[in-house]
Image: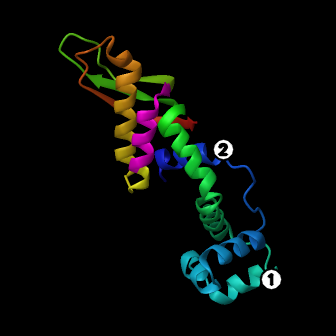
Amino acid sequence: MSVFGDGLDAAVQKAFTRPAPKSAGAQMRYLVKQLKGTKAVAQMLRISQRTVERYVKDQIKKPRPDLAARLEAEVKKRWQPQIRAKARQKAATTGGIVIDTRARIGYTAPIGTTDEDRLRHLTVALPPQHAARLFDAQEHGATDQQLQQIAAEALKEVYFQDNGRRAGQLEEVHLTSIEHLEFDL
């Protein structure tokens, strides 16, 4: 499970202007239209082409839980691409992104400072350049670990160093044991 990637996707999905299809038949019809055929959908979902056709005709209405999850994920990944792109663009250029997390956060700093990891709950508005870095990294296939590192660097700069006004000696922020993570645009 990708905590950071899923969190970024959820934030962007809040910008949708129309709800994604809910029923299995409607979701299947949408995917068939997007991928231009039942064969491509069958291969993507790892089911038979005949099964896809039966969902399209509403002959099957209730998918197994694992198939239902894959189906919903694939539809949401493709739903309203222009709206998704606009939301990401706005966050990366003007709006920024808000990160709300409850995690163990510590840092590397000079000797004599309190750098012990401790559980913190932070809600921090990150400026557009940090949102841009997160979305660019996600788009280029960054791992959850890499996204976590980018978020930690953003928290270091914005929260701990207050954009250069304090904690100038702070070297690195560690973000571990994430209990809660949510992004908002």
Residue at the location (61% across, 55% down)? Answer: 82
Q: Quarter holding the C terminus?
A: top right
Query: Would you name the residue on which mark 2 appears?
Result: 14
Q: Which kind of residue does numbered mark 2 sit on?
A: Lys
Tell me, for residue 57, which label it has, or none.
1
| Residue 165 against residue 84 in the figure, above or below | above
The magenta span reads: 125-137
| Residue 1 against residue 134 in the figure, above or below | below
Q: Is residue 7 visible?
A: no
Residue at the location (48% across, 37% down)? Answer: 93
Q: Residues within 10 Å of mark 1 (few under 14, many from 20)?
A: some
Residue at the location (80% across, 74% down)? Answer: 61
Residue at the location (65% across, 60% down)? Answer: 79
Q: Position of residue 73 (x, y in %)?
A: 61, 61
Is residue 89 located in the magenta-colored stretch of the structure?
Answer: no
Foreground residue, 102 or 153? Answer: 153
Q: Position of residue 16 (x, y in %)?
A: 68, 49
Q: Is residue 171 visible?
A: yes
- Magenta: main secondary structure: helix
Q: Which kind of residue does numbered mark 1 sit on?
A: Lys
Q: Position of residue 137 (x, y in %)?
A: 38, 48
Residue 175 quadrant: top left
